[in-house]
Image: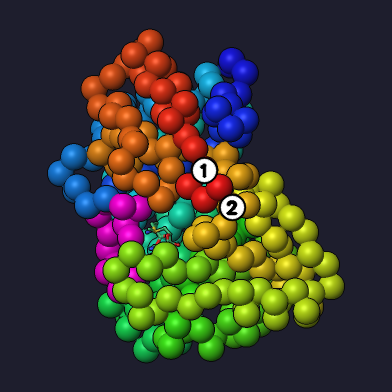
C-alpha cells in the first residue's frame, strides 16, 4: 500500500463510494439516484474489483456500495468477497431484499449496512417510495441486527410536509438499541423543492435535548446522544464543514470517478482502463477534488 493520497487542499482521501447500478426496485419521489441513470452501462464485476484493488494501493480504508439498489446486482456477494484485505465495506440499501441476504452478506465479509427508511407509517412510506413493502424493510433491519451488520444506520431523508413530523417516532424506534443509529438527511432539492426543509431547527432541538454531542471525522458531522438514542444530521448543502472534512471519492455505476457529490462537470472516465493507466486516473480524480462550499 502507498501512502494515503491528499488533494491540493490537504484533504486525505480514505473513503470510496461505489455505485453498483442505477437500477432500483423503488421509485422515491425525491431520489437523485447519485446523479446517474444509465442502466445499460454498468461496470462488470472485474472492473469493480480492479478499481477496489487500485483504491487499496492508494490507502483507501473504507468502501461503501450504493446505487440504484446495490442488492439487486446478482454478483453482489462476489463483489464483497473481493474487497481487499484491510478495507472495511458497508452498503447503503433500501432494505427490501435485506432480510434474505443479511447472513450471506455478513459471511461474504460486509462490515455493516445503512438502511434507507423515510417513514414507519405504511401509507407515508408508500407515498414516498411507491411501495407497500415497509414490513420487509423492517424485517431486513432485524436480520441485519441479528447477524451483526452493525451499527445499522437508518437513513431518513426529512421531507417537509410529508415525514418531518415523524422524527420523534424514529427516535423512539432507535432508542435503547446501541446498534441502531438514526441519520437525518437534509433533502438535496434537485427536482422537488417543495419538500425541502432546513434541518437547522431539528438540529437545534436535538442539541438542546442531548446529554452528549460528539463530532465525527466523516464530514465533521455531529452525533447527538439523547435518552439512549444516537442521531446524526447530514447537511451537505451550503456547509463548508461538510466539504472541508470530505474524505470521499465516488465511482459511478458506468465507470467514472466523481471528485465531488455536488458537481457533474469534473469526472474522470475509467471505463476499460487497467493497471498503470487506472492508477494514474485515480490520482487525477483526487487532484481534481476541491471543496464545493469554501
Ligand atoms: N437504494 C439505496 C438506498 O435506498 O439506500 C442506495 C441509493 S440511495 C440514492 C442512497 C441514499 O441517498 C439514500 O439514503 C437516499 O435516501 C439518499 N438520497 C437520495 N436522493 C436524495 C436527495 N435528493 N437528497 C438527499 N438524500 C437523497
| Disc 2 C-beta below 8 A from ligand 1 | no
Q: Earlier in the sequence, mark 1 or mark 2?
A: 2
Quarter of the image for residue 130 reads bottom left
Where in the figure is residue 265, as x and y percent of width and height?
A: 30, 41
Dot 1: what SS?
A: loop
Using the image, determine if residue 259 lies above or below residue 287: below
Which residue is pictured at 28% across the width and 29% down the height? 269
User: CA gap, disc 1 to disc 2?
Assistant: 8 Å
Q: Which of the two residues, 219 or 163, is positioned nearer the viewer here?
A: 219
Q: Which residues lie in the magenta part?
A: 22-35
According to the picture, the residue beneath numbered tag 2 turns out to be 240
Asked if marks 1 and 2 touch (Cβ < 8 Å), the reply is yes
Q: Is residue 211 magenta?
A: no
Which residue is pictured at 41% across the width and 50% down the height? 262
Magenta stretch, main secondary structure, is loop
Res. 143 mark: none
* Residue positioned most to the right: 211
Dot 2: what SS?
A: helix
* Residue positioned most to the left: 40
Amino acid at each position: 500500500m502507498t501512502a494515503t493520497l491528499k488533494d491540493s487542499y490537504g484533504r486525505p482521501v480514505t473513503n470510496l463510494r461505489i455505485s453498483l447500478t442505477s437500477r432500483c426496485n423503488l421509485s422515491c419521489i425525491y431520489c437523485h439516484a447519485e446523479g446517474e441513470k444509465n442502466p445499460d452501462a454498468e461496470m462488470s464485476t472485474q472492473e469493480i474489483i480492479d478499481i477496489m484493488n487500485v483504491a487499496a494501493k492508494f490507502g483507501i480504508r473504507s468502501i461503501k456500495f450504493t446505487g440504484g439498489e446495490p442488492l439487486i446486482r446478482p454478483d453482489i456477494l462476489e463483489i464483497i468477497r473481493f474487497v481487499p484485505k484491510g478495507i472495511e465495506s458497508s452498503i447503503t440499501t433500501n432494505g427490501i431484499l435485506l432480510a434474505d441476504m443479511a447472513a450471506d452478506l455478513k459471511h461474504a465479509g460486509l462490515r455493516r449496512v445503512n438502511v434507507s427508511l423515510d417513514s414507519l407509517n405504511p401509507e407515508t412510506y408508500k407515498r414516498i417510495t411507491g411501495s407497500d413493502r415497509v414490513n420487509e424493510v423492517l424485517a431486513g433491519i432485524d436480520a441485519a441486527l441479528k447477524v451483526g451488520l452493525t451499527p445499522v444506520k437508518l437513513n431518513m431523508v426529512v421531507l417537509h410536509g410529508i415525514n418531518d413530523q415523524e422524527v420523534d417516532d424514529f427516535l423512539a424506534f432507535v432508542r435503547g438499541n446501541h446498534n441502531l443509529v438514526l441519520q437525518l438527511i437534509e433533502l438535496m432539492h434537485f427536482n422537488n423543492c417543495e419538500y425541502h426543509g432546513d434541518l437547522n431547527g431539528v438540529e437545534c432541538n436535538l442539541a438542546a435535548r442531548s446529554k452528549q454531542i460528539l463530532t465525527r471525522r466523516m464530514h465533521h458531522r455531529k452525533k447527538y446522544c439523547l435518552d439512549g438514542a444516537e442521531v446524526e444530521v447530514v447537511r451537505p448543502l451550503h456547509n463548508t464543514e461538510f466539504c472541508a472534512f470530505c474524505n470521499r471519492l465516488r465511482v459511478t455505476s458506468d465507470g467514472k470517478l466523481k471528485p465531488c457529490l455536488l458537481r457533474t462537470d469534473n469526472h474522470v472516465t475509467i471505463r476499460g482502463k487497467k493497471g498503470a493507466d487506472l492508477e494514474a486516473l485515480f490520482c487525477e480524480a483526487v487532484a481534481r477534488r476541491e471543496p464545493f462550499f469554501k
